[in-house]
Image (cartoon, helix red, strand yellow):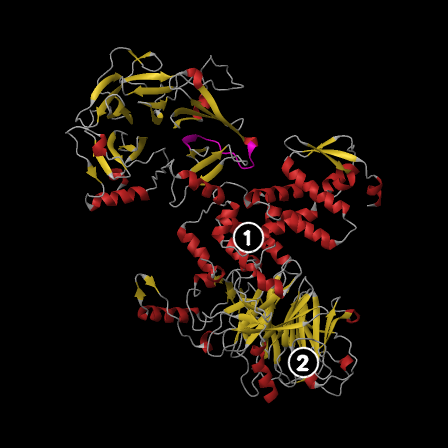
């Protein structure tokens, strides 16, 4: 339905009845009681000058017990002589006349000249009180600005105004007159049977509330309240405060049109300041009038035969529709029942929800950043949803940079299920503040963490990040099929989980560098995608120059993502066996061995569309992959398992690095060891990682029950290798010790170190000089992997320059697809039984 | 710090935005880098130092914090920590914001730190609707936009109604 045809304006309320007008001319058309749902259509009014709007209102004549509607309009007949304007007494050529209609009759009665503003303003704030309707007459420099129409005598009269305080006014005004500025911010209403003038002096941040205690007696104007800005701590809103109600509890309610808020003021309460209760729900502006709800039917109130009281409820559907539409349009009446509201107001007090109090936006940017930077990733993602300002704040490049510079790295855990496509990566963020990673505290703080009687830690991994699928188009097609067969019940579309082949869609997790992940395709481990799982962006890497040589023995490629601080470029490296035969011995850049290896390296500078060959790559004689790709300091590092048992360990370079600035392989001197010879099995138990800004070697010796954590405090300086911790596994209380590789993940600010134990599928956390706790990952029946990852809000678009690599976003593509097995939650659990299976397995094997 | 203890009885007057004056011992005032710089430069301690951005209520809180930390600078950290958490306990958002602004203006790092952390802790673990209410932020998303932003990280809202 069109608002033009069906909308009605709200004019005023009198004794529980509302007067409604049609919006185009503001002529009164309906009187209704919104509680009983009755309404009366008013007779068609006399023709008026079409170019101007009418004023109208509705009141009660206590003498005759009749309800009367008044309408003021510009008559069509020409005005030939001066007439006396009834309020100001000025003699003017005004075409403005008034008509009244007594409810129950069928006609309008002309009663002569009506008050009007010289400047064509309408009469504001129609307020019924004491047998008369009152308005504010918006005019310059007049003292009779309160107009009234007395329904008993059928005459217009000015009401004597209150003695407003005005400290200063320029130019000086004659006594009793008020300036335009004052007029503009003034409002009229009725508070507890007293006419009320609400004088808002926005320059001095003051609202004076005047009431006329005895009707019509100027001397009884009293200042009820003076609300000043200094009485409170909240913001001051300019504009008109329309008085609505003075409740029994002593609170005053206003409506602030510009803020669309009900304003609550209680002088009795100790914190007596203005509270803004915003009206919400529909995206629109709101209006409000004072209304006393009444169950008195129009039938009883209005006498006369010419009356047809209709009921909204009994009428046909279109009317109901209209009513609904009318509500939807946002013309909301807020009725305040003085009988009921007292109780409700205490709730308002409690809520304080909509009080325009402090806001993060009010704080200087460095402080709001400071606050946001203290939040974990999940909270930040939620805060993006608060409002646009917050979202922009968090998406801000400057914020992202600051966030990254102080972010810690955390374990990013993923299921290795062979039958599913694990797109979800679970970031485990240990609680940061206070005493660090205190499990006890954590258990009690989190609702869903079961703090069991045995003091076992159990926590849901909530921070779930997504990586893209390899073949999005293929997946989208399958989704189309799924949707066709998927049922939609009751309009709610239920997405069916779609089944995709891991072979086609799975991506392997290679390494993390500055918040970005390098992903490879699983068949050959060739790098294909770089993504930021926080922003959901990803870049498909350019097509490889050539597939790896597939002849026997098949070897996986090695790859990784790194950053060149010198050129500010992200680069991906790929090492593979080239197809061409090698006829000349080539020197291995790390071990120095000369042989006919086909192993070569290529790099892609992100943003360019091509791969660049950079020559021979280091490789293990025995076909081992380069293990533990770890980015630090402009270089990617790996462990190279290439043993020669007889060779003294000090001369052996088992830490390989590729420097992205120099685009060269460089051997990193390993930490000193007591035993000169490193066995092959030994080699397999060593792991590499980055703790804080140090390269770290984690050396685990099952035979001696020790684990040593070495860090290189000064990059590439062998002498700076320092033993950070030595964990004696026999003295480790409480938990059984797992044999196998402990991959160092992070050294938290709190002093705790987290490892990932691949065979045990567990996050192992070590509190310095205290116990070791094994937190088993569980939820899906599969093995798990984990890498260290520093969450970052930095956009790939800002990080990668160049036109050759469009930045795609998983969220705009396949994120909505539900894949099989994706709905399950992952947990970290300290429960020992969970680990038993591992111990059983390891003892059998 | 030794010199400031010698000047223990030296006092200066701080004036809040609403005109209230506070008499503070110098070593307490030195917790504020702003005041320290003022005292180090020409400003005579006899003068009243106006703090036009800080109202009396907030200034009283700030000085309470400074006093505790100045007096207890040599004593146990644990005691101070418990004072800090007690200090901010039950403080409403408006007061916290004023405190953050005051700490920022007066350059009291410790106070800025704990107040900012307290605000961050309030945001943490809360659904966005609640955050809106706490910070009186008007939601300027249309329902569609909000759903879209929400959908981007649906998991984050799991467990919230």
On screen, residue A805 above or below A193:
below
Q: Secondary structure at mark 1?
A: helix
Q: Residue at x 67, y 80 (%)?
A: A685
Query: Can you give x and y, in whole percent of width and height, for residue A458 in the image?
Result: 56, 69
Eyeballing the image, is A395 above or below A831? above
Q: Which residue is mark 2?
A: A685
Chain holding disc 2: A
Q: Is residue A675 magenta?
A: no
Residue depicted at x 66% and y 64%: A748
Residue A639 drawn above or below residue A460 = below
The disc label shown at residue B123, or none: 1
**Label 1 Cα neighbours within 10 Å, binned few <14 / some 14-19 / many ≥20:** many
In magenta stretch: residue A245: yes
Looking at the image, which is closer to me, A487 or A654? A487
Q: x, y (%) of residue B112? A: 66, 47
Residue B43 appears left or right of A571: right
Q: Residue furthest left?
A: A305
- Residue A288, position as x, y percentages in the image: 37, 35
The residue mark sitting in front, 2 or 1, is 1
Q: Is residue A685 visible?
A: yes
Q: Along the line of sight, which residue is nearer the eye, A404 or B124?
A: B124
Residue A698 found in image quarter: bottom right
| Numbered range of the magenta stretch | A231-246
Quarter of the picture containing the C terminus of chain B is: bottom left
Chain containing mark 1: B
| Label 2–label 1 contact, CB within 8 A | no
Neighbour class for label 2 at 10 Å: few (<14), some, many (≥20)?
A: some
Residue A385 appears anywhere in the view: no
Residue A177 picture quarter: top left
Spatial CA distance of label 2 from label 1 is: 43 Å
* Towards the viewer: B79 or A550: B79
Q: Is residue A231 left or right of residue A491?
A: right
């Amino acid at each position: 339905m069109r608002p033009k045809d069906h909308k009605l304006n709200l004019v005023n309320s009198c004794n529980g009845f509302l007067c409604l007008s049609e919006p185009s001319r503001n002529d009164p058309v309906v009187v209704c009681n919104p509680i009983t749902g009755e309404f009366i259509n008013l007779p068609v009014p006399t023709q008026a000058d079409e170019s101007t709007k009418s004023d109208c209102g509705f009141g009660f004549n206590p003498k005759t017990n009749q309800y009367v509607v008044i309408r003021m309009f510009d008559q069509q007949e020409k005005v030939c002589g001066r007439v006396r304007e009834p309020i100001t007494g000025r003699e003017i050529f005004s075409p403005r006349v008034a008509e009244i209609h007594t409810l129950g009759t069928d006609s309008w009665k002309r009663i002569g000249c009506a008050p009007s503003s010289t400047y064509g303003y309408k009469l504001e704030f129609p307020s019924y009180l004491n047998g008369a309707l009152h308005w504010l007459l918006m005019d310059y420099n007049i003292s009779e600005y309160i107009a009234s129409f007395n329904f008993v005598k059928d005459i217009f009269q000015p009401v004597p105004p209150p003695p407003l305080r005005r400290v200063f006014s320029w130019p000086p005004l004659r006594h009793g007159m008020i300036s335009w500025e004052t007029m503009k911010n003034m409002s009229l209403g009725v508070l507890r049977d007293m006419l009320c003038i609400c004088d808002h002096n926005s320059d001095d941040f003051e609202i004076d509330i005047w009431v006329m205690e005895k009707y019509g007696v100027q001397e009884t104007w009293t200042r009820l309240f003076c609300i000043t800005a200094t009485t409170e701590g909240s913001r001051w809103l300019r504009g008109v405060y329309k008085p609505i109600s003075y409740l029994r509890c002593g609170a005053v309610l206003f409506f602030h049109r510009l803020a669309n808020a009900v304003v609550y003021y209680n002088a009795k309460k100790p914190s007596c300041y203005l509270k803004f209760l915003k009206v919400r729900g529909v995206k629109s502006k709101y209006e409000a009038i004072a209304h006393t709800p009444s169950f008195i039917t129009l039938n009883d109130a209005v006498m006369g035969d010419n009356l047809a009281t209709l009921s909204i409820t009994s009428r046909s559907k279109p009317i109901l529709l209209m009513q609904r539409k009318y509500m939807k349009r946002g013309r909301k009446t807020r009725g305040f029942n003085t009988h009921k509201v007292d109780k409700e107001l205490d709730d308002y007090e409690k809520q304080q929800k909509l009080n325009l109090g402090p806001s993060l936006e009010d704080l200087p940017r460095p402080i709001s950043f400071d606050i946001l930077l203290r939040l974990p990733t999940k909270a930040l993602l939620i805060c993006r949803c608060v409002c646009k300002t917050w979202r922009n704040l968090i998406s801000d490049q400057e914020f992202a940079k600051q966030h990254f510079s102080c972010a810690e790295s955390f374990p990013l855990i993923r299921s290795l299920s062979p039958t599913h496509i694990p797109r979800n990566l679970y970031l485990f963020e240990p609680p940061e503040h206070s005493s660090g990673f205190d499990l006890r505290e954590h258990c009690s703080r989190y609702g869903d963490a079961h703090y069991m009687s045995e003091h076992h830690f159990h926590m849901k991994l909530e921070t779930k990040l997504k990586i893209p699928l390899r073949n999005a188009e293929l997946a989208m097609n399958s989704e189309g099929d799924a949707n066709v067969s998927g049922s939609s019940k009751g309009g709610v579309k239920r997405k069916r989980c779609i089944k995709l082949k891991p072979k086609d869609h799975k991506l392997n997790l290679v390494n993390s560098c500055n918040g970005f992940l390098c992903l490879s395709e699983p068949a050959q481990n060739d790098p294909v995608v770089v993504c930021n799982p926080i922003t959901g962006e990803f870049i498909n890497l350019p097509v490889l120059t050539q597939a790896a040589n597939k002849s026997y023995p098949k070897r996986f490629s090695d790859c990784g993502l790194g950053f060149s601080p010198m050129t500010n470029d992200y680069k991906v490296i790929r090492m593979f066996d080239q197809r061409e035969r090698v006829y000349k011995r080539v020197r291995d850049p790390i071990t120095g061995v000369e042989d006919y290896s086909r192993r070569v390296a290529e790099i892609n500078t992100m943003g360019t569309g091509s791969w660049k060959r950079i020559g021979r790559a280091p490789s293990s004689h025995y076909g081992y992959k380069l293990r533990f790709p770890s980015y630090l300091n402009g270089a990617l590092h790996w462990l190279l398992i290439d043993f020669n048992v007889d060779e003294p360990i000090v001369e052996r370079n088992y830490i390989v690095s590729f420097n992205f600035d120099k685009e060269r392989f460089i051997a990193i001197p390993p930490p000193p060891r007591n035993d000169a010879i490193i066995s092959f099995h030994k080699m397999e138990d060593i792991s590499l990682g980055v703790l804080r800004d140090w390269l770290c070697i984690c050396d685990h010796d099952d035979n001696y029950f020790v684990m040593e954590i070495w860090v290189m405090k000064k990059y590439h300086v062998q002498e700076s290798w320092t033993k950070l911790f030595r964990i004696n596994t026999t003295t480790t209380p409480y938990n059984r010790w797992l044999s196998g590789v402990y991959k160092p993940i992070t050294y938290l600010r709190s002093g705790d170190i987290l490892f990932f134990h691949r065979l045990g599928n567990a996050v192992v956390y070590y509190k310095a000089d205290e116990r070791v706790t094994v937190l088993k990952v569980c939820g899906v029946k599969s093995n798990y992997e984990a890498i260290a990852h520093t969450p970052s809000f930095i956009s790939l678009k800002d990080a990668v320059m160049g036109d050759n690599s469009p930045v795609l976003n998983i969220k705009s593509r396949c994120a909505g697809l539900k894949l099989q097995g994706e709905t399950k939650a992952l947990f970290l659990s300290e429960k020992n039984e969970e680990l038993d299976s591992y111990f059983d397995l390891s003892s059998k094997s | 710090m030794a010199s400031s203890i010698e000047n223990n009885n030296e006092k200066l007057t701080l004036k809040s935005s609403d005109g209230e004056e506070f008499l503070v011992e110098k070593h307490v005032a030195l917790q504020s880098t702003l005041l320290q710089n003022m005292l180090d430069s020409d400003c005579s301690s006899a003068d009243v130092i106006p703090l036009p951005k800080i109202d009396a209520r907030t200034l009283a809180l700030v000085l309470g914090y400074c006093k505790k930390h100045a007096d207890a600078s040599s004593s146990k950290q644990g005691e101070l920590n418990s004072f800090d958490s007690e200090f901010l306990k039950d403080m409403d958002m408006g007061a916290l914001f004023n405190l953050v602004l005051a700490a920022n203006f007066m350059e009291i790092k410790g106070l800025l730190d704990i107040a900012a952390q307290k605000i961050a802790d309030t945001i943490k673990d809360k659904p966005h609707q609640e955050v809106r209410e706490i910070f009186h932020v008007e939601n300027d998303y249309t329902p569609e936009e909000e759903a879209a932003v929400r959908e981007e990280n649906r998991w984050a809202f799991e467990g919230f109604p």
